Amino acid sequence: MASLSAQTLLCIALTVVICLIGGVDGSLEGGQREFDYFALSLQWPGTICHGTRHCCSSNACCRGADSPTEFTIHGLWPDYNDGTWPSCCAQVQFDVKEISTLLDALEKYWPSLYCGQSSTCYSGRGLFWAHEWEKHGTCSFPVFRDEYSYFLTTLNVYFRYNVTKILNEAGYIPSNSKRYPLGGIVSAIENSFQATPEVICSKDAVEEIRLCFYKDFKPRNCLASKTSCPKYVSFPAYVSLGRNESETDGSWISEDEAL
Ligand SMILES: *[C@@H]1O[C@H](CO)[C@@H](O)[C@H](O)[C@H]1NC(C)=O
Ligand SMILES: *[C@@H]1O[C@H](CO)[C@@H](O)[C@H](O)[C@H]1NC(C)=O
């Protein structure tokens, strides 16, 4: 009897696993039910870029004067009303070619703020966008059935509500010395967006603001959750990290080494 190589056995095992998690009845994998609402998660570069220790070309924190100074998109997430969420809902791999016409906008408004690759469901590790589409985007069925419409609509919803502008106009200006009342930030968004956002902090700094939507993109309240923020929060200004030879000496490393 010919002995099977370890590689062959692994291939067979993987095929079985893929068949098991593969589509039972079409739309959602793994018996996950249809989602209840969307959260548009926006990240604050002022906070996240403070944590950048090394620079790399994929990290928008490292673009010097071109680094983002407004909230950028983290993702559009289908969620359940019980606080959980579906993930990796269709066995499709992210294909950057499908969104080639959106890349300029995505680089600007939906950039990665980290080095290192993101985990994905089916294509190993890859781009930040691959992670968002495979993990979250595929669960937005039946609202979105393809990658292009998921990314295009997310950009359009993002353009409709300029959270950076809402906060600035209410007097919440990025600062590396001031503290602001969390309640004031929430109220400023409620007044403009007409629904309650969720604010996520890293220590005392605003890291993300999430806007929630019904499936037709009418605003709705996010779930009332225990916030990760203190009563008074900081809203840090972006501090340039890169493009300064004298300061970044030795800190530019290749993407593979980062993280
Ligand atoms: C949001 O508003 C700010 C001004 O406060 C502006 O600089 C920025 O371009 C706006 N962003 C978008 C995506 O329209
Ligand atoms: C670059 O570093 C020098 C020396 O530390 C500093 O004087 C200068 O302001 C920095 N330039 C930028 C653009 O950060």
Image: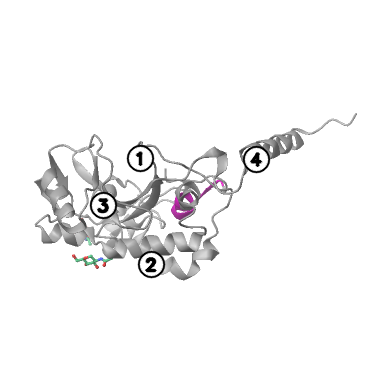
Identify the residue position indicated by label 3 in the image. 44
The dot on residue 81 is 1
Identify the residue position indicated by label 4 in the image. 18
The answer to whether the residues at label 1 and label 3 have Cβ atoms under 8 Å apart is: no
Magenta segment:
124-132
Which tag is nearer the camera, tag 2 or tag 1? 1
Q: CA distance from mark 1 to mark 3?
A: 25 Å
The answer to whether the residues at label 2 and label 4 have Cβ atoms under 8 Å apart is: no
The residue sitting at 35% across, 48% down in the picture is 54
Q: At numbered mark 1, what does the secondary structure look like: helix, strand or loop?
A: loop
Identify the residue position indicated by label 2 in the image. 105
Q: CA distance from mark 4 to mark 3?
A: 37 Å
The answer to whether the residues at label 4 and label 3 have Cβ atoms under 8 Å apart is: no
Q: At numbered mark 2, what does the secondary structure look like: helix, strand or loop?
A: helix
Which tag is nearer the camera, tag 4 or tag 1? 1
Q: Is residue 107 above or below residue 251?
A: below
Q: CA distance from mark 3 to mark 2?
A: 17 Å
Question: Mark 1 or 3 closer to N-term?
Answer: 3
The residue sitting at 31% across, 55% down in the picture is 61
The dot on residue 239 is none
Q: CA distance from mark 2 to mark 4?
A: 34 Å
